[in-house]
Image (cartoon, helix red, strand yellow):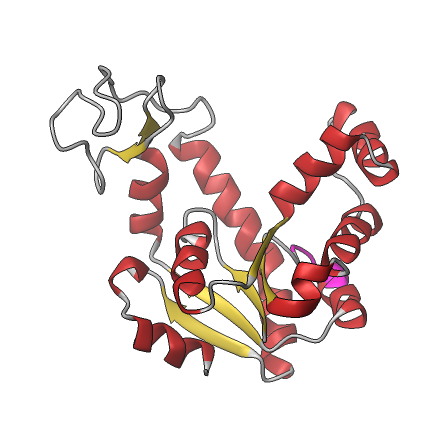
């Protein structure tokens, strides 16, 4: 059983790499903080309602609320039996320290990708409005230009409103500022492992096992 943290900048490919890990550890739970938030908000749990209060005011959800949600999720049976891939948490040093009180961690996997590749990944992404299939102008265009591979609908490249160079630069700068103390914390614990995430889809099962030390 493995307890893993996936860490890296926006566009590093945490979701893609999680999928690769699940090929060698099919039962491991992929615990995404985005999913946990959506679930708590949808079910209107006490923590979800607390988070909504801050979100409605446009404020950041305090660490203790986020930690509470993560703690609840990590106490569920699937996680206890099969381990987890934690994606999107911790985002601050207090969160990292609180996590060590909730669960031990086997590896802190730091996905490393150049800013140039991240820019192409994020600024090039778009999706089919009919079926939701995801494409990328630079790295993953449809086989036939303007036609969705999945459903055959007409598609065109349209960026999301928040996918622009200015916003992306701010997001990456914020990530780097917050990431440094977290990376330092796990390095000190001897749990840090750097992963070249420029093309994780090309990694073989044996290479993934080697990264995960299994």
Q: Residue furthest top?
A: 154
Q: Specify the quadrant of the image occupied by residue 80.
A: bottom right
The answer to if 92 sits in the magenta stretch is: yes
Where is the N terminus found, in terms of image quarters? bottom right
Please give left or right for residue 96 compared with residue 145 in the image: right
Q: Which residue is found at the position 28% from the left and 67% from the top?
A: 203
Side (left or right) of 208 relative to 184: left
Residue at 52% x, 42% y: name it.
Answer: 171
Is the C terminus in the top left, top right, bottom left or bottom right quadrant? bottom left
Residue 50 percent across, percent down from the top left = 86, 35
**How many marks can you see?**
0
Q: Is residue 198 visible?
A: no
- Tell me if residue 16 can be seen: yes
Residue in the foreground of this view, choosing between 133 and 182: 133
Please report the residue visible at 32 percent of the width from the left and 20 percent of the height from the top. 158
For the point 59% across and 84% down, the residue is: 190
Does the magenta segment cover residue 84? no
Quarter-of-image position of residue 139: top left
Above or below, comparing residue 160 to residue 32 in the picture = above
| Rendering coords of residue 75 (x, y %) | 77, 60
Q: Position of residue 35 (x, y in %)?
A: 62, 42
Magenta stretch: give its range: 91-95
Above-or-below relation of 123 to 182: above
Q: Residue furthest left?
A: 144
Please name the predominant secondary structure of the magenta segment in the image.
helix
């Amino acid at each position: 059983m493995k307890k893993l943290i996936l860490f890296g900048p926006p566009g590093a490919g945490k979701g893609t790499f999680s999928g690769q890990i699940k090929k060698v550890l099919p039962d491991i739970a992929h615990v995404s903080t985005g999913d946990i938030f959506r679930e708590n908000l949808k079910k209107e749990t006490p923590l979800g309602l607390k988070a909504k209060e801050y979100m409605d005011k446009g404020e950041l959800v305090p660490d203790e609320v986020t930690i509470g949600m993560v703690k609840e999720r990590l106490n569920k049976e699937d996680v206890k039996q099969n381990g987890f891939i934690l994606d999107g948490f911790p985002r601050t040093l207090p969160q990292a320290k609180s996590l060590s009180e909730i669960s031990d961690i086997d590896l802190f996997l730091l996905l490393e990708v150049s800013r140039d590749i991240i820019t192409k990944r994020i600024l090039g992404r778009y999706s089919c409005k009919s079926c939701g299939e995801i494409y990328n102008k630079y790295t993953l265009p449809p086989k036939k230009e303007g036609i969705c591979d999945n459903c055959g609908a007409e598609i065109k490249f349209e960026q999301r409103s928040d996918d622009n160079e200015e916003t992306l630069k701010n997001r990456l700068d914020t990530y780097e500022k917050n990431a440094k103390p977290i990376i330092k914390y796990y390095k000190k614990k001897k749990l840090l492992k750097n992963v070249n995430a420029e093309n994780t889809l090309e990694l073989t099962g044996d290479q993934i096992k080697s990264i995960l030390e299994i």
